[in-house]
Amino acid sequence: MLTLGLQPCEGTDVVPPGARSHTTLLSGLFVGDIPILIQMKLGIDSSGDVAMKLTVRAEEIVLSELVHTLVSEA
C-alpha cells in the first residue's frame, strides 16, 4: 500500500453522503522537507467505476512527476 503522509486541507476529507464526485486537497512535506500540494478529483459513474484526476504541485517538476508515477502504479 502506498503511503505519502499527506494531510487533508480545508475539511476536504469529508465526502457528503451520496456524492457522485469529490475533490480533496492534500498537503505535506516530501523527503528533505520539500512542500507538496495535491488536488485529487474523484468521480464515480452509475456502474461503480471510479475515475481520478491528480494535480501535483511541488518546487521541482521531477517531484510532481514522481508522485504521479507512485500513485498510478499503486
Image (spheres, rainbow, N blue to C red):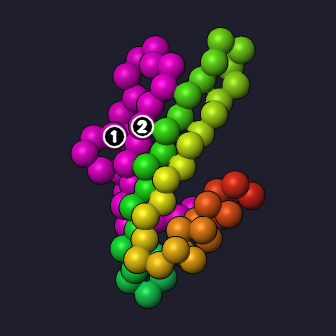
Which residue is rendered at x = 40% and y = 29% of the image? Answer: 15
Magenta span of residues: 1-28
Secondary element at image label 1 = loop
Q: Quadrant of the N terminus?
A: bottom right
CB contact under 8 Å: marks 2 and 1: yes
Measure how far apart labels 2 and 1 are at the Cα level. 7 Å
The majority secondary structure of the magenta stretch comes to loop
The residue identified by callout 2 is: 23
Is 43 part of what is drawn in magenta? no
Is residue 6 visible to us here? no
The circle drawn on residue 62 is none
Q: x, y (%) of residue 17?
A: 41, 17
In the foreground, 24 or 54: 54
Q: Is residue 59 above or below residue 36?
A: below
Q: Is residue 56 above or below residue 41?
A: below
Is residue 34 visible to us here? yes
Which residue is rendered at x = 53% and y = 34% of the image? Answer: 42
The residue identified by callout 1 is: 12
Which residue is rendered at x = 70% and y = 25% of the image? Answer: 49
